[in-house]
Each structure stands twice: as C-alpha cells, then as structure tokens.
Image (cartoon, helix red, strand yellow):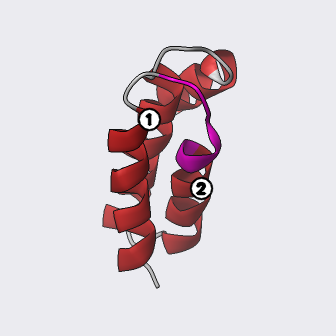
Amino acid sequence: IQAYQKTIDLGSGQKTHFAARSALELAQYFEKMNQNEKAKTYYNKALAMKGHDYKESIDQKAKAGLSRLK
C-alpha cells in the first residue's frame, strides 16, 4: 500500500501510467477488502489523472469498479 501511495504521490501529473495504475490497483485491493469508500476514492483518483499512457484502459476499469460499488 505504501509503495502504491508513493507512486501516486510522485507520479501524478506525469505522462506515464504508473500513478494511475497504482491508484487502480489500490482501489481494487480495497474493493476486495470490502473497504468501499477507500476503493471509490482511489477509483476516482485514477479517473482524475490526465494525459498519461493507457488512459482509456485505466479509466474503463475504474468506471467499472465504481459501477460495482453503487
């Protein structure tokens, strides 16, 4: 969790996908642990990151996760 969070902190605003992917991974982890509010927070963080590689793919997965949590 700490490594993913550090990647998010350092990589937000970068052109690479690592921060967005880390947010997605944390969201999926928290979803599996039934910590739905934390999962929603990280899905939304992944969606909020702009201009990175794999934007469409990561956004699609984040939207699907949010849809599951409604």
Q: Is residue 17 above or below residue 60?
A: above
Disc ID at residue 17 = none
Quadrant in which residue 31 is drawn: bottom left
Residue position for label 2: 44
Q: Position of residue 56 (x, y in %)?
A: 39, 41
What span is colored magenta in the figure? 46-52
For the residues labelled 1 and 2, the Cα–Cα distance comes to 13 Å
Q: Is residue 45 above or below residue 62?
A: above
What residue type is disc 2 on?
Asn
Q: Position of residue 4 (x, y in %)?
A: 49, 29
Whichever of callouts 1 and 2 sits on the residue coming sooner in the sequence is 2
Q: Residue furthest bottom?
A: 70
Q: Position of residue 39 (x, y in %)?
A: 50, 61
Using the image as rendered, state which of residue 3 and residue 56 is in the foreground: 56
The residue at 45%/53% (across/down) is 27
What residue type is disc 1 on?
Lys
The residue at 54%/29% (across/down) is 2
